[in-house]
Amino acid sequence: MMILVTFLFTIGLMFVHIFSRKLHFLHSDKRHQFLSLSSGVAVAYVFVHLLPELNTYQGILENTLDNKILILLEDHIYMMAMFGLVGFYCLELIVRKMKHVNKAEENAEASMRIFQIHIGMFFIYNTIIGYLLVRGEYGGYLGLTFYFIAMAVHFITNDWSLRTSHKDVYDRYGRWLLSLAVLLGWTAGTFLGIQEVMVSLLAAFIAGAIILNVLKEELPENRLSSLRAYLLGVVFYTLLILFV
């Protein structure tokens, strides 16, 4: 039964990527309010659920690692969260640098190369999210539903950002590739189990990556954000996770 539910949620996340451009409020004056709200939801989920869950994964590391080099990670599961944040930070800097140096708006070949790098990283990102949909620790259907909701609204934000960066090429190729990535991750999680310690490292990596991807959308000066909507998302989803 759980596999069926995770499959339905996977299809739901795929539909988000495929059809999010048709959400009318993303083309209205209320867009910035929804994007800020979704950012707040994602942040609340990471800090209230994912990061505390890393304590459990920390125990897995301590009981698993016996290699003298890998044992350095024994007390640093959060290091993987840092790697996720730093990795996507570096990606964004590389993309912006390439756009500036190559004047991507005027160079179709450079623009496509930047698109491939950007989408390639997010393909990995979505694959891990799809994998964790099956292999993550959620404590039942309710926890799994919280994960799905948080990732769904987060995907809408990512879609808007990538579509803004890559215009029509994202709709032609990007949204389909990212949808496929979620399905690929779910398939791997269903049929190809990996050691629990690797699941813990993937979950930590995604936690850091989500934090960066949320902040990069909320903090730029040219981003029209809504503090009220952002705080509403944080408070509402925090209370939902804590008390439901």
Image (cartoon, rainbow, N blue to C red):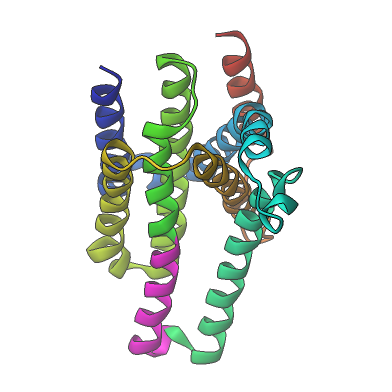
Residue 91 appears in which quarter of the rendering?
bottom right
Q: Main secondary structure of the magenta part?
A: helix
Q: Looking at the picture, how far across and down is residue 52, in whole percent? A: 67, 29
- The residues colored magenta run 105-121
**In percent of the image, x 56 and y 36: which residue is there?**
42
Image quadrant holding the C terminus, namely top right
Q: Is residue 49 above or below residue 102?
A: above
- Which of 76/133 is in front? 76
Q: Looking at the picture, how far across and down is residue 162, in whole percent? A: 42, 61
**In percent of the image, x 52 and y 46: which residue is there?**
202
Of all residues shown, which one is farthest toward the top? 243
**Residue 28 appearing in the image:** no
Q: Looking at the picture, how far across and down is residue 23, in whole percent? A: 32, 41
68 with respect to 146 (left or right)? right
**In percent of the image, x 43 and y 23: which residue is there?**
144
Image quadrant holding the N terminus, namely top left
Residue 188 forms part of the magenta stretch: no
Disc tally is: 0
- Which of 66/199 is in front? 66
231 with respect to 130 (left or right)? right
- Which of 4/99 is in front? 4
Q: Is residue 174 above or below residue 132?
A: below
Residue 115 forms part of the magenta stretch: yes
138 with respect to 113 (left or right)? right
Q: Looking at the picture, how far across and down is residue 5, in whole percent? A: 28, 22
- Which of 48/41 is in front? 48
**In percent of the image, x 44 and y 15: which residue is there?**
140
**Residue 77 appearing in the image:** yes
